[in-house]
Image (tube, helix red, strand yellow):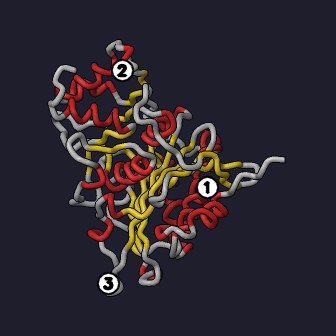
Amino acid sequence: MGQFPLTLGRFISQKQADDQGASGGLPGLLVQVGLVGKLIAQDLRRAGLLNILGTTGQINVQGETVKKLDEIANETFVKVFEQNGLVCALASEELEKPVLFPENWPQTKYMLLFDPLDGSSNTDSNMPLGAIFSVVRFESKDRMPTEDALARKGTEQVAAGYLLYGSSTMLVYTVGQGVHGFTLDPGIGEYLLSHESILIPARGKVYSVNEGNYQKWAAGTKQYVEYLKIFDTATRRPYSGRYSGCLVADVHRILLDGGIYLYPGELAKPEGKLRLLYEANPLALVVEQAGGRASTGTMRIMDVEPKQLHQRVPLLIGSSNDVRDAEEFIQGKRPGG
C-alpha cells in the first residue's frame, strides 16, 4: 500500500518547522488561508444555486464594479483572520483602507495582503477563479501598523501564494524555501501534497496575454508578441496562445509547464493594470522561488518601491528565458524581432 499524501498542516510542520520563515505562527497562518479557500470553494460550488452571481452595483476602490462573489470572498478572508489572532493588520484589493487588529498587537508580527477573488469576470460563466496572498512582518513594538507599513517591497515578503478554484481547488505557497502545491480532497476536507518543490522550465511554449489590447501597446510589446507567432524550429516557435481571464489560472499553467504571462503597460496607461502588492509581488515571489522571473519590462517586480497601497504595475512573469526575451523587446534591444 502506498504512503498517504501529506496534508498541508503535516507538511508544514514536518518540512518547514526548521525554516526561519516558517516560525512564529506562519504555519498556522498558511493553514488558515487554506480554510478561507475551503469556504470560498464551497460558495463557488453552489454559486449558481444561491443567487450570488452578478454584481452588487457598487464600485470598489479601483473603480471597478464589485461582483457579489468578490464581496463574499473578501468578507470570508476578513472574518477568518479577525477570529484567529494570527495577523495584526490586513489589506485587500477590495478595501480602500487596511483593517487593523489592535487586540493582536504586539504579540502578532504578521500582516496579510490579498486579492480575495481573482478573475471575477469569470464568475457568471463557470470559468477558473483564484485568490492571491502575501505575508509581511511588522516588527515594531512601539506603535500599531499603519497603511504605510503594509506598502512593502516584494523582497520583504516572508510568504506568498495563491488559491486556484478550477476543476479542483489548489493552494500553492512559498515561504522562501521552494514552492509547494496542495490539492483539496473534498471527501476528507484536507489539502493533500500534490506538487512538491515545483520548478518552472527555463523556457516554455505558451504565452498568455489579452490580445484585444494590442492596439494600446507600445511598439516593443507588439513586436515581442508577433515574434512569438513566427515559425522557427530552433526556438520552438510559434508559441501557443492561452488566456483565461484569470491571472492565477494562467500563471499556474505557466508555473507547471513554462511560458510567459503578460499584462503590459499601455501607451495611455504605462503604469499597467495589475496591483503590485496584491497580485504582482506575491506571484513574483512564487515564480522566482520556482526558478522563474517577474518583471515590469524594465526592472524586477520585487524591487519596485511601493508608493501607495493600491499601486499598479505592468507584469511579465514566467520562464526566465521567455521573460528576458520580452524585456529585451520592450527595452528596444531587439527591435523588430
Residue highlighted by disc 1 = 39
Q: Answer with left or right where residue 186 lies relative to residue 82.
A: right
Relative height, residue 307 to residue 228 (above, below) = below
For marks 1 and 2, give the CA distance. Answer: 44 Å
Badge 3 crowding class, 10 Å Cα cut-off, few under 14, some 14 to 19, many 20 or more, is: few
Secondary structure beneath disc 1? helix
Which residue position holds label 3? 143
**In this view of the protein, can residue 287 be seen by the observer?**
yes
Instruction: Tell us which disc is closer to us: 1 or 2.
Output: 2
> How many numbered circles does the render carry?
3
User: Considering depth in this image, is 155 or 93 the residue closer to the camera?
Assistant: 155
First-in-chain label (3 vs 1): 1
Residue 151 got which mark?
A: none
Figure check: 53 above or below 220: below
Question: How far across and down, in percent of the image, does residue 100 sit?
Answer: 40, 74
Could you tell me the amino acid type at mark 2? Thr
The residue depicted at 36 percent of the width and 39 percent of the height is 320
Viewer-proximal residue among 143 and 252: 252
Q: Residue at x 64, y 41 (%)?
A: 49
**Picture disc at residue 235:** 2
Residue 142, position as x, y percentages in the image: 32, 87
Q: Quadrant of residue 212?
A: top left
Residue at 71% x, 55% y: name it: 189
